[in-house]
Image (spheres, grey):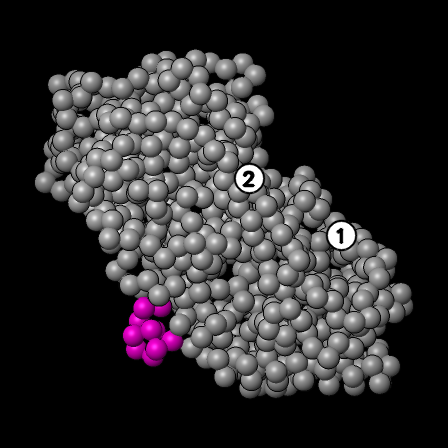
Amino acid sequence: MQPLLIGDRLGQLRAALTTTHAAQWRRLYEQCAWYRGQSLPAEHPTASITYLGPAAMNLALAYRLTGQPGYLLEARRWIGTAVSYPHWGKAKMPDHDLDAGWLLHGLSLAYSWLRDDLPDDEAAALRAKLALQGERLYAFAVETEGSWWSSSYWQNHNWICYAGLAAAGYVLDEPRWSDRARENLATVLDLMPGDGSDSEGVVYWRYGVPWLAIHLDLLQHAEGIDWWRRGDFLSRTFEWRLHQCAPGFEENIDHGDCHDRRSGHSVALYYKLAAAYRDGRARWLADHVADRHFWREAYASGVRPGVMPEAGYELLWYDPQMPAVDPADTVPTSAHFPDLGQVTARTSWQSGAAFVSFKAAPGGGHTAWDTAERFRRDKGWQTLNAGHHHPDAGAFVFGAHGEFLAVDDGYCNRKRAAYHNLVLVDGQGWAGEDRYQVYQDLPHERQARLRDVLTGDGLVHATAESAAMFDPALGVRRVDRTLVFTPAGRLVVLDLLAADQPREWTFLLHSDWPAELVGGDIVLRSGPAQAYVRQIVPDAATVSQATTEIEANPTGSTPSLRIVRTLHTVRVQVAPVVRTRILTSVEPTCALAPSAAVAEPVDCAEGVGVRFGTDGETVLLAPADRRIDGADVRAAAAAVILLPGSADRPAQVGVVAATHVDVAGRDLVRSDEPVTGVLPWPA
């Protein structure tokens, strides 16, 4: 059998090292030089050993491309170390989880590429070790079918372990392994969300999704099967990832378990998605990260092995014929991902833009939640392991001027709604929280959702419903949050809250730095960024501040690893009432030369509203009653958003679920069916 992945293109790759692939080759040989300086533990450490897999692969690839004996010698050292360990993995599920998957993949490719160049005894030892570890992983997958990663189709452990098993199956000619892995891959591709979203968050996207690409690449080269268009997830996932970039593209919006905001990029995966789907935006982001952010991603990221060990795949997946396309030229500044119940928006694709992300969905997203319920009902299987999905329905992340102002909690083992920008009821978060798997064993009907979504150019409106997530004993009847992000980068947030009996309602707002209470405003600051937060609360309320400390170990494979994050929390507590509403405006400005806050409430006979005085942006909301009367607007609608024109934008009106809208005596909408969209200002 020809060397896997490179057998038919070795000559082409060698010729490209000094021409089209020079930058990718430089990162590969720099990584191989780094390997040469590392001392390898003689005994299996307590920490993860996943890094041994890509090291063997990268060194073997460098040798096959150049013939330089030093690379072969170094590959033998790393391979010999991995082969010497009786088990792969120590602290968590030895031989049966990520360490085994990573090493099976990397060492299988190394064996495929080096078997004729290794001493006979070392080649035999490597083959025997791959056979042993492959059988261990295969047997575990069969024995645990219907539980944990063997059938966790939306989870990175599934993708990694089966890709490793596939690589070993192809190299050792063990069709039992590769066939089972292929069958699992088919199920994964068929069941992944069609909007390209990943409920595990950006960090686990960059950690896990490359393995779907690896497996597809192996399948295509070994069996001639092209599944790149099977399902819609992979063809659309770059769009989702792009909208998770904070302005400037260096950091990421960190919903879900995110070790930090700098662990989101995989240059290799961007190259592969660009080549597979002829997506110039993915090529552009790969080049942008490689040129501007690569080393900070490599050294500041908390995810290991990280971006540097992907050097071999960078070289293999790079297509110089795919031209780069700047997203600013082609990609709208707002987006909706319905499976994850997420909307995002930004004022532009420039680094200083204001941005927001807002989400609400069942555990794992709608597809996973509903499909997992069918597996449970029909087969008794536990297929949804949404441990990286937080209790964050209705939460938002917001920033401007290159900084985060309203923030999420990052990585968390004992997940709680109180760690997010949400509302608590009698000081309580969700039913069944304060554990790792907050969605496990919840009744299927206990779902949050996003409704009434409008996205336009830099405009977003959506309403999150999350009352079902609270303990039924609280009698919560409504926890609806409507969020509007305007083209000027302002936020308006309306919380409608109700219960069977009087409850205390606590609005939470988290930031990286302590907020300041200035007059009636809450002022958020972070470096050059600042935001004024104004609230209209009709019931008695008190404002206080506290710190919220979150501690986590992001990997059971390294028990000593500890991440601590301190959030600074504003708490707005409304005294017990049966129902209340909290109307909040957020206005970003530059902290070094701040402008004044201009948000003012609109006097409405029906509905509620906020008007921003400098340019007249006006947000009118009635998400429950759907009757609006104020600011010279009368409407039967969930929302009317007035956007006066500017030098670069015509005057427009956003409407949500509208059957009638009258602006200044002029009919804008009259319809039997609800209308949602951005319309020209009435003439």
Residue 380 inside the magenta-drawn segment: yes
Give the camera-side residue of 238 and 380. Answer: 380
Local crowd size for mark 2, using a 10 Å CA cut-off: few (<14), some (14–19), many (≥20): some
Q: Residue at x 18, y 42 (%)?
A: 501
Q: Can residue 163 be seen here?
A: no
Q: Residue at x 27, y 32 (%)?
A: 575
Category of crowding for the residue at label 1, using alpha-carbon neighbours closer than 10 angstroms: few (below 14), some (14–19), many (at least 20): some
Q: Secondary structure at mark 2?
A: strand
Secondary structure under tag 1 reads: helix
Q: Name the image quarter holding residue 642.
A: top left
How many marks on residues? 2
Residue at the extreme left: 672
Where does residue 656 sit, x and y in percent of width and height?
Answer: 23, 36
Q: Residue furthest right?
A: 69
Magenta segment: 371-381
In the rendering, at what x and y percent does residue 485 appear?
Answer: 37, 31
Q: Disc 1 residue type?
A: Arg
In the rendered image of this protein, does residue 297 appear above or below residue 134? above
**Circle 1 is placed at which residue position?**
27
Q: Alpha-carbon distance for marks 2 and 1?
A: 36 Å
- Spot occupied by residue 452 in the image (x, y as percentages of width and height): 25, 42
Q: Which residue is mark 2?
A: 566
Viewed as shown, does residue 577 lie left or right of 306?
left
Identify the image quadrant of residue 460. Answer: top left
Q: Amino acid at mark 2?
A: Thr
